[in-house]
Image (cartoon, grey):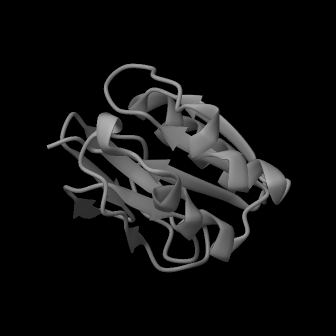
Amino acid sequence: MKLHQEASGALNTITSYGADYVAINLQRHEGSIIVMPETPVIAWPVSSFEALTPEDFDALIAIAPEVVVFGSGARLRFPHPRLIAKLSQQRIGVETMDFGAACRTYNILMSEGRRVAAALLIEA
């Protein structure tokens, strides 16, 4: 799904996505990523929902968003609370949604100036 006609070079915007990719400012990524508005896109070494560990979410603590939008893949699946416990301890909110909804929600929150991170799971 294409979301925008043109990319904004100033902020990381999700410009399109599909079942096996996401494009940030028109640059295509075919693996899981973490994206924030003003920082470089981070490759997220997660290939399946079932393989998620608490350490996979630790990378989000270091970048200190106010909220994480977790795109759980093609369908909505909630991570076990132990996986995101450290985020909660740091008072970082986590909202879980399917991949497409996470992409759209990230763009809305980013455009509002929120310190949002999207952790987008692209399963191989």
Residue 3, quarter of picture = top left
Residue reaching furthest right? 91
Q: On screen, 111 above or below 73?
A: below
Q: Quadrant of the C terminus?
A: top left
Answer whether residue 4 is visible to the viewer in this image.
yes
Q: Residue at x 43, y 63 (%)?
A: 7
Q: On screen, 43 above or below 79?
A: below
Along the horizontal axis of the image, is 100 left or right of 55? Answer: left
Q: On screen, 98 above or below 113?
A: above
Q: Position of residue 29 (x, y in %)?
A: 24, 60
Q: Residue at x 71, y 54 (%)?
A: 87
Q: Quadrant of the N terminus?
A: top left
Q: Position of residue 56 (x, y in %)?
A: 46, 58
Q: Residue at x 52, y 32 (%)?
A: 79
Q: Position of residue 41 (x, y in %)?
A: 43, 72
Answer whether residue 13 is visible to the viewer in this image.
no
Residue 91, quarter of picture = bottom right
